[in-house]
Image: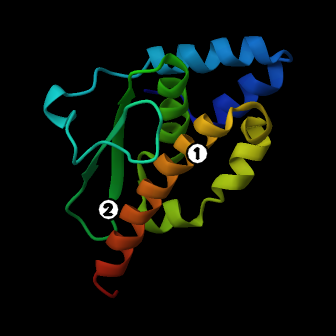
Amino acid sequence: MTTTIDQIFDDFAFLDAWDDRYRYIIELGGDLPPYPEAARDAAHKVPGCVSQVWLNSTVGDQPNPPISYEGDSDSHIVKGLVAIVLALYSGRRASEILAVDPEATLKRLGLDEHLTPQRANGLRSMIKRIRMEAAALAENAPAS
């Protein structure tokens, strides 16, 4: 996926109606690369989501490496939310991930007001998982 979080912010600002924004979110999900079948397992499944959601990470081997994410869902809207989460976090270093204020991002996009409670909880579960992984990596990083 090549869409950045800044592009998503700009596109959301351009779209006035939430019906259009929902269609855009679904399109974002449709643009995700295919998710590997081997990572469609319990270890990669995100708990706390009503829909099935899987996240897989790849961590580089250099100090303070960037973390790349891929994800998928069995729901079109949730798959779009996965795409937003990946645009926000994938390719960043653990310290950068931990510095992002996810609630401010959700608020800026208006997602905090326009998602059902179940979808909002699922979105927060995805973010929580990514932040926990980043915190563990940051904690185990060698001192410089």
Quarter of the image where one finds residue 93: bottom left
Above or below, 20 against 69 in this view is above
What residue is drawn where x is 34% and y is 46%? 68
Residue under the image location 39 percent in, 21 percent down: 74
Q: Are marks 1 and 2 in contact (CB under 8 Å)?
A: no
Report the residue that reaches farthest toward the bottom.
143
The answer, for residue 141, to whether it is visible in the render is no
Please, is residue 13 above or below residue 20 in the view?
below
Q: Quadrant of residue 38?
A: top left
Q: Nearer the viewer, residue 59 or 109?
A: 109
Q: Identify the residue at image location x=28%, y=20%.
A: 34
Q: Amino acid at mark 2?
A: Pro
Residue for badge 1:
121
Q: Earlier in the sequence, mark 1 or mark 2?
A: 2
Label 2, secondary structure: give it: loop
Of the pair 124 and 28, the residue shown nearer to us: 124
Query: Circle 2 sits on which residue?
Result: 65
Measured as percent of width and height from the top left, residue 94 is found at 42, 64
Extreme residue toward the right, this view: 16
Label 1's element? helix
Whether residue 142 is visible to the viewer of this picture, yes or no, is yes
* Three-letter amino acid code at the position of disc 1: Asn
54 left or right, relative to 78: left
